Image (cartoon, helix red, strand yellow):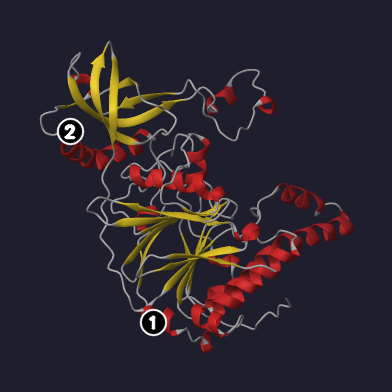
Amino acid sequence: RSVTRQQPMTPERLVLRRDATSSSYAANDSRFSLANKMHGQYFQLYYSRFRALAPRVRDACSNTFGASVPQRTVLELVEGERCVVIGTLYKDMRLKPVILDEYVKDYDKSAVKTLEKYTAEDDRLELEDESARLKLVNIAAAPFVTGVVVGCVGKAVKGDFVVEDTVVFAPANVQAKPKSADDSEARFVCLVSGFEIGEEDSDAAVRNQMFVDYITGVGGDDDDVRASGKICRVIVAGGVLKQTLASTDDAAAAKQQTNGSTDANGAAAAAAARSRPLKELDMMLTELVSAVPVDVMSGKSDPSNQAMPQQPLHPVYFPEASRYEHTLHTVTNPHDFTVDQTAFLGTSGQNVADVMKFSDIGDENGSFIGDDAAKRAVAALSATLRWQHIAPSAPDTLACYPFKDRDPFVMETTPHVYFAGCQEAFGYERVTHPNRGETVVISVPKFSTTGTAVLVNTSTLEVFPLTFEC
């Protein structure tokens, strides 16, 4: 297929589609802001997490086990008494990397092995509350990660806590979504991630342009144009660039600039080559925002801070697209927003990758739909939904900032749509909360390798993959 790059409208001539202008939108990302300086110790983050989730877990334990089962702190446990204890899990893992090892004499960094997973059969769980910590027995450590707040029923035996079958998490707080039967009123949010611009792949460039043509309504047949006209917003869930701008080439280029005209020319050429992906991304976003509002989330490979929560990409990277100040929005990762009373919450995938790396969460998803390769990612994302925490493994194995007054990753309200970008494949499942509505959990694949984006109906929460092939 031949692809012709369309000239985007200037901001002065910008006319959005009807659905883009008539949908309501609100961003709720203030808790992820680093506007105030971060300082303090990480225990304050864990303390804030426990204080936020423990009351909800207590209520859930009372409803599950009844008021007759007493709730105790770790220091209040009585030998042999059946009771409930609530706290934060710590997963003791033999294979988990320890950063302090770098300061040990004769440490050989080259000998450290990078594993796909760090789980082992002898992993064990401990539970810590505000008073003390104790070892949990008769409970599988595999499905958990450090940082999950739970309630356990069981008995204290010889200094350990023997857990019964049931483990309780904080209940979800989600409003039911009314379904609309009128297809003419349907609006869609498009989720896409992992463009990874900078890859020397002609097919990827063609798919990127096909995506832009579809969203802007200049490609495809009449049905495609009508369908794309119902897209009211595009969310780019990270991974816009192949690699960060800061690379080992920067030092080499700087060195060349001091060694004569030939080396200076080489350095200039290297700098131009590094800036080319940004220019291509800027042009791509300019075309998109000329037709529909776009939220661009930071991702692991993007030029933003690497610790969570990632802050918005600076507008200086997008000189042309930034002229569309009403339709281009660079946002945090995670991103919490509402479109037409439908609550969305998503990340660029780091939280899911970390949970999969440090747990053995299965892929037996009863309501799963999609590619088998996405099953485990959807299971991991669904687990964080059950735990009511976006990134429970932070700061233990996932880097984050030491917030001292709050844990921004706690789910105060549960979204209708919960997604993670930059995944291996597309898939989703519907998680039903008893008497509390449902949440659609979506694995958004890398567009660079799959050519697939995801459409979500904001009224019915129906999910459709949108695949481009060339």
Tally the numbered discs: 2
Q: Is 294 on the left or on the right of 176, as rendered?
A: right
Could you say where residue 262 lies in the image, as x and y percent from the top left? 89, 58
**Numbered tag placed on residue 321 in the rendering:** none
Q: Dot 2 corresponds to which residue?
A: 65
Amino acid identity at mark 1 = Ser
Q: Secondary structure at mark 2?
A: helix
Q: Is 409 on the left or on the right of 13, as rendered?
A: left
Q: Secondary structure at mark 1?
A: helix
Could you say where residue 331 lies in the image, as x and y percent from the top left? 46, 62
Front-most of residues 361 and 392: 361
Could you say where residue 37 lies in the image, as x and y percent from the top left? 40, 48
Q: Dot 1 corresponds to which residue?
A: 184
Could you say where residue 453 lies in the image, as x and y percent from the top left? 54, 64
Q: Residue furthest left?
A: 68
Q: Earlier in the sequence, mark 2 or mark 1?
A: 2
